[in-house]
Amino acid sequence: MQRSRLKYWLGILGDKSIMDINRSDVELGLKSLPEELRNTTINKYKKLVSVVFNYGIRELGLTDNPTRYIRSLPEKKGRTRYLIEKGYLKLVGVPNGISSTFLY
């Protein structure tokens, strides 16, 4: 999944030097994403390009990360999930047939 996002950014920004990419370039790339994508997915695209710029700051001498000026989109709250005993036992790696009374 990350690879396809990285390919997307290379297609959008690949002809520019990383030193020349600015906030408007990143915003244009985010606005060019398909409209049916959820905010969570769009934020993942933003996060990936942000990681690339942070690497550039650490390793290549970049002075700024243009994504830090772009707000992430609001995301829906995830749903709360509860484990039933069978799922809990599987999660903690208890073999079948072992009494769970020793685990609480």
Image: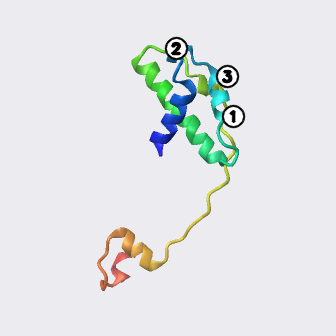
Q: Nearer the viewer, residue 63 or 19?
A: 19
Residue under pointer 2: 19
Nearest to N terminus: mark 1 or mark 2: 2
Q: Quick check: 1 above or below 7?
A: below
> Where residue 52 sits: x, y (%)?
47, 28
- Residue at the image position 36 percent from the left and 81 percent from the top: 100
Looking at the image, tell me whether mark 2 or mark 3 is earlier in sequence order.
2
- Closer to the camera in the image, 76 or 25: 25
Indicate the position of residue 83 as horizontal and vertical percent values.
49, 72
In-image side of 37 versus 96 (left or right)? right
Category of crowding for the residue at label 1, using alpha-carbon neighbours closer than 10 angstroms: few (below 14), some (14–19), many (at least 20): few
Render colour scheme: rainbow
| Three-letter amino acid code at the position of disc 2 | Met
Q: How many marks?
A: 3
Instruction: Report the residue marked by disc 1.
Output: 31
Question: Which amino acid type is marked by label 1?
Answer: Lys
- Which quarter of the rendered picture does the C terminus lie within? bottom left
Q: Based on the displayed image, in which of its 4 quarters is residue 47 positioned? A: top right
Residue 53 placement, left or right of 29: left
The amino acid sitting under disc 3 is Ser
Question: Separation of disc 2 and disc 3 at Cα?
Answer: 14 Å
Q: Secondary structure at mark 3?
A: helix
Q: Which residue is mark 3?
A: 24
